[in-house]
Image (tube, rainbow, N blue to C red):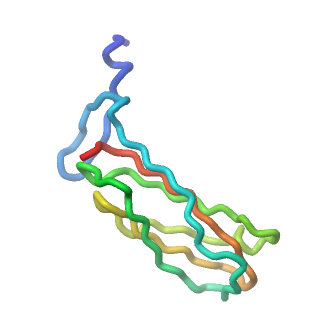
Amino acid sequence: MSDNAVNYSTVYTTTMGNQNVKTSELKFITSTEQVVSGESVIADTTKDLSFNFPTDYKYIPTVTISPVNVGKNNYGNNVIVTVKEVTTSRVDYTVRFNTTGSVSLSVNIIAVGIPQ
């Protein structure tokens, strides 16, 4: 593998296909966002949320969201996070609570893509 290939990453975009860019030029945005803190939730309910990126991407980025149970019980362990829509400026997602109880929950958000 050439030194040149090592310094590049391929990003798939829905509008322009594969884009080869210098890895150092990729934009990574990470955030921990609080969903609920000590709130009573009911099983099978959902909460719709959004996260606005501090700066826009050129193309829709790849986004992953992971739940983090920050409470002192197991109620926050039984949730599902679904990414609903990703744009160049934000991600919309839903948290589904699968048990009833007092929940403290955050999510870790990671977005990777080509900067504007």
Judge whether 14 appears above or below 18 on screen.
below
Judge whether 27 appears above or below 40 on screen.
above
Where's residue 74, x and y in %?
78, 70
Where's residue 112, x and y in %?
39, 46
Please tell me which residue is depicted at 37% across the width and 56% down the height of the picture. 54
Q: Quadrant of residue 20?
A: top left
Q: Quadrant of residue 41?
A: bottom right
Please tell me which residue is depicted at 32% across the width and 33% down the height of the picture. 25
Q: Is residue 101 left or right of residue 8?
A: right
Please tell me which residue is depicted at 37% across the width and 29% down the height of the picture. 24
Where's residue 52, x and y in %?
38, 64
Number of numbered markers = 0
Judge whether 90 appears above or below 19 on screen.
below
Identify the residue at the far right of this view.
72
Where's residue 102, x and y in %?
75, 81
Q: Is residue 1 left or right of residue 77?
A: left
Identify the residue at the far top of this view.
2
Judge whether 26 appears above or below 53 on screen.
above
Q: Quadrant of the N terminus?
A: top left
Q: Quadrant of residue 105?
A: bottom right
